[in-house]
Image (cartoon, rainbow, N blue to C red):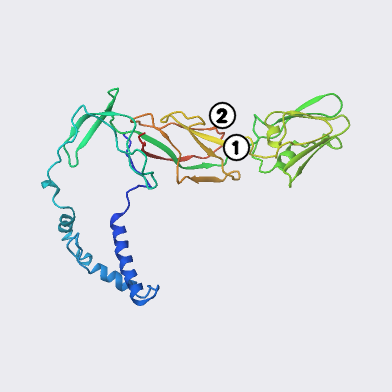
Amino acid sequence: MKVHFFTTNNETKASIVERFHRTLMSKLTRYFTEYNTRKYIDVIEELIYSYNHTWHRSTKIEPSSVNIDNQAEVWQNLYGDLSKQKSEKAFFKVGDTVRVSKWKRRFGKGYENNWSREIFTVHQIIPRNPIVYKLQDLKNNVIKEGRWEVGLAEIIYPHTWYNGNEKNNIFGFDLGDGKLITRKITPGSYETVPDILKAMLLPSHEGKISFKFNANSKRVKIKTEKKSKVVLEEGLSDLLGFHTHVVEGVAESSFVAEPQAAFPVFCVYSNIVQPVVAGHVEAPLLRGKDGDVVSAHYDRPHYVPVIRQSFQTIEIELRLNSGALVPFERGKVIIVLHFRMRQIL
């Protein structure tokens, strides 16, 4: 399957609409000057009627007179008979070395070079109007379909992973008798820190181990008495804002406790793009409750080069910054990609 270029933010604007807008604004400005007013609501219908019944130089007809029967004639008046136009004479010949002119963007600097640094050679000349040149690079690779890049335009995913799972739900404690007991909190989605602490608390802890969450500082305080201890293992300690260590006495978390600390970021990986330093596409996880469907739209995607000229399918993986797959429990993920031609350097 070949890639077909499209863009939602094309540099080419709606010229006909813009020309209509300019004409209408010219009429309004003359009206404002003549009557010394900025009010136009009572005359706008008359001005539009005037526009629609005025002969146009480009189409040689009034817009109100255009219909299905004469639309071909109007098109001919505007564009002429293309079949009778002579083809241009090719300026370059096969084998010539050339650079590619780059599109000057809206805020492009006028003093910068407006052509590519890379040099190409003319591989084939196609006699069209205008002339079409097929190019090849200096390694004789023909530029067939152009150079493409892709960006993440939209992602919709279900908030259905367990922040308390089999890999981060372990902790241990000693009630003062020298026996270390290992426990696991039930895997699930814990929306708040108190929910996690409630799952950790056991009847045998009474009078010996207590957990307290400060809603203002967002930190957890663990207090042990009568020679008891709490062993915080990697994973669960991150959710509570602690380093992995053994708590004896009173200890407060060094960091803010965050139920979603295990899943701060995920990366969108694909087999059609070149590797980049921080994953193929990085998307911060958005806030949401368990079961929510989260949607994120990116008006200005981060584009990365496409490494394939054609493909049948696209493989996409969502991975955490640890490299593990995002552990969705259920639901579907929808991803919208946006392809565009690469900017030639």
Residue 309 versus residue 257 in the image, above or below: above
Residue 332 versus residue 312 in the image, above or below: below
| 98 relative position to 109: left or right | left
Q: Quadrant of residue 14?
A: bottom left
Q: Residue furthest bottom?
A: 35
Q: Quadrant of residue 16?
A: bottom left
Q: Secondary structure at mark 1?
A: loop
Quick one: 21 or 106, which is closer to the camera? 106
Q: Quadrant of the C terminus?
A: top left
Q: Which residue is mark 2?
A: 324
Q: Secondary structure at mark 2?
A: loop
Residue type (three-letter) at the residue carrying disc 1: Pro
Q: Quadrant of residue 173?
A: top right
| 259 relative position to 105: left or right | right
Q: Quadrant of the N terminus?
A: top left
Q: Which residue is mark 1?
A: 264
Residue type (three-letter) at the residue carrying disc 2: Ala
